[in-house]
């Protein structure tokens, strides 16, 4: 045991095996249909991307360009299915845990690293949303990886580690704009490389040079990617589109949602007290808290804010908690040893024992929270029931196109096969193609006037759409669209109270 605690390589191997063991349940029962709207948009949009339709031109995309490219890559590797995309997003959760654990391990705390990994992998919030197709966890994986690489540079490594970390952070931003909140943390870790040793002026110069390198690589890479996809289109759809919805921003409502979500997660809520203790660990702890604080501020001004956005807090919170536990343990050792900072009359040892006791109590609480989180995860996995109505209409649409449900090769798109629906997850599961510009018919796009009735009518005629399924109530918000459908599509089938399938020869 002593050899394990003193050997960093053995600790890393142990952390890897622990992570893979705890993460195994997340890979069970993948491939189930979900009626989460964003997942359907991203799945169907990535499929259109794989079919050759131009992003931001033929396909309306409200996210940075790398996100759909990663889903398309998962399709290329594992086939165009829901399970292929879920394998990718669950994999990013595992990568996030490993990266966070590696960072904590750099301060010499295997227990803190293990706790940080367990916090992520046993969090019901992370578990649930990693099985949906959203960009928050993949972006966090890139950001955590960038900080892990910067930590390697701060410990005396070559500048190549910092370059790699900057590229990883650019990847985080290109998946989800939330990735930018990790930039100050990356720069602080780079500055830690020069925190001591030598005259002050050369150290300040090296710090400034590293900061310039980080900023140049991150923004240079992002700019190059944006220019490659069309700067005006990317800005209009991925940035201005979101800025236009901030008129009725409610910070109090956002704060309440964040608190309820985090407190309701047994793994995250018990890690909160430890996160504050990260302030005791200079540089790396401050960087983790900076990432956490900026992400929290970003969520407070996010509009609209939904539960899946809050998953962006999981990685920085787990990282801060792991570092906080390591810092407390180191403090207890210093007090117990009676070094120069402790009193020599016995109070130092008493304080050290008290700190050790606090660490044990906190670790026990985290373990209990993790076990409760794992129980919640099992409930999620066991009782996740896709809506029967969605599955029935998806199967009916698949039969009408001759495609097996959930399978689509992307090789035989023709104008006879296009349908239009405001439930893109149903279209994806049925193997039916949608007019690329109309895959995203979100309420935000409609309310911000990024989609008009005339556009829908034009795209329906352009792709000779023969079937139009109104399912969620989104497209009905477009003025005059239902009246136009009544005139243009003579046959209608009703499903329940809101579902209507319009058909024409």
Image: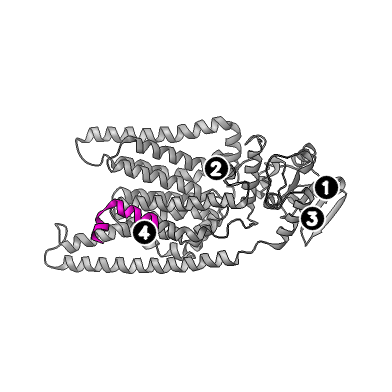
Colour mapping: one colour
Q: Which mark is residue 114?
A: 4
Q: Which mark is residue 208?
A: none
Q: Secondary structure at mark 4?
A: helix
- Residue 292: x %, y % from top left: 41, 52
- Residue under the point 41% across and 65% down: 270
- Residue 87: x %, y % from top left: 54, 51
Q: Which residue is mark 1?
A: 485
Q: Label 3 vs label 1: CA separation?
A: 11 Å
Mark 3 or 2 closer to N-term?
2
Mark 1 or 4 closer to N-term?
4
Q: Residues within 10 Å of mark 1 (few under 14, many from 20)?
A: some
Q: Which residue is mark 2?
A: 70
- Left-right relation of 191 to 293: left
Q: Label 4 vs label 2: CA separation?
A: 29 Å
Disc 3 versus disc 2: nearer the observer: 2
Taking the magenta stretch, the answer to whether it contains residue 13 is yes
Using the rendered image of the protein, determine whether residue 275 is visible from the camera's viewpoint. no
Q: Which mark is residue 500?
A: 3
Q: Secondary structure at mark 1?
A: helix
């Amino acid at each position: 045991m002593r050899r394990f605690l003193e050997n960093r390589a053995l600790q890393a191997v142990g952390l890897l095996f622990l992570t893979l063991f705890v993460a195994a349940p997340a890979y069970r029962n993948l491939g189930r249909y979900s009626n989460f709207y964003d997942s359907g948009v991203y799945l169907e949009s990535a499929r259109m991307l794989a079919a050759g339709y131009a992003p931001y031109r033929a396909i309306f995309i409200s996210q940075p360009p790398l996100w759909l490219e990663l889903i398309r890559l998962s399709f290329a590797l594992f086939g165009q299915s829901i399970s292929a995309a879920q394998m990718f997003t669950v994999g990013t959760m595992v990568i996030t845990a490993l990266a966070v654990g590696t960072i904590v391990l750099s301060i010499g705390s295997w227990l803190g690293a293990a706790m940080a990994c367990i916090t992520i992998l046993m969090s019901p919030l992370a578990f649930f949303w990693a099985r949906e197709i959203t960009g928050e966890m993949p972006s966090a994986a890139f950001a955590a990886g960038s900080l892990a690489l910067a930590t390697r540079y701060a410990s005396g490594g070559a500048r190549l580690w910092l370059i790699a970390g900057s590229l990883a952070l650019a990847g985080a931003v290109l998946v989800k704009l939330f990735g930018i909140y990790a930039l100050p943390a990356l720069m602080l870790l780079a500055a830690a490389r020069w925190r001591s040793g030598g005259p002050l002026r050369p150290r300040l110069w090296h710090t400034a040079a590293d900061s310039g390198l980080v900023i140049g690589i991150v923004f240079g890479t992002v700019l190059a990617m944006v220019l490659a996809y069309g700067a005006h289109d990317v800005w209009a759809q991925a940035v201005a589109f979101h800025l236009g919805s901030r008129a009725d921003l409610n910070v109090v409502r956002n704060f309440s949602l964040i608190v309820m979500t985090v407190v309701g997660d047994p793994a995250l809520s018990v890690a909160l007290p430890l996160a504050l203790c990260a302030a005791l660990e200079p540089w790396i702890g401050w960087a983790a808290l900076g990432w956490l604080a900026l992400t929290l501020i970003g969520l407070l001004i996010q509009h609209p804010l939904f539960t899946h956005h809050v998953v962006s807090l999981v990685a920085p919170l787990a990282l801060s908690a792991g570092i906080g536990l390591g810092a407390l343990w180191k403090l207890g050792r210093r007090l117990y040893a009676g070094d120069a900072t402790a009193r020599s009359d016995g109070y130092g040892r008493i304080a050290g024992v008290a700190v050790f006791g606090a660490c044990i109590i906190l670790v026990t609480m985290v373990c209990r929270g993790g076990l409760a989180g794992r129980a919640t995860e099992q409930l999620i996995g066991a009782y996740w029931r896709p809506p029967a109505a969605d599955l029935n209409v998806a199967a009916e649409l698949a039969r009408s196109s001759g495609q097996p449900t959930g399978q689509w090769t992307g090789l035989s798109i023709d104008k006879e096969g296009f349908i239009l629906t405001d439930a893109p997850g149903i279209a994806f599961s049925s193997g039916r193609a949608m007019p690329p510009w109309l895959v995203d018919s979100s309420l935000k796009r409609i309310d911000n006037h990024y989609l008009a009735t005339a556009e829908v009518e034009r795209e329906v005629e352009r792709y000779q759409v023969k079937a139009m399924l109104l399912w969620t109530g989104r497209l009905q918000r477009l003025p005059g669209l239902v009246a136009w459908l009544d005139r243009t599509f003579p046959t209608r089938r009703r499903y329940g109270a809101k579902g209507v399938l319009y058909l024409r020869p």
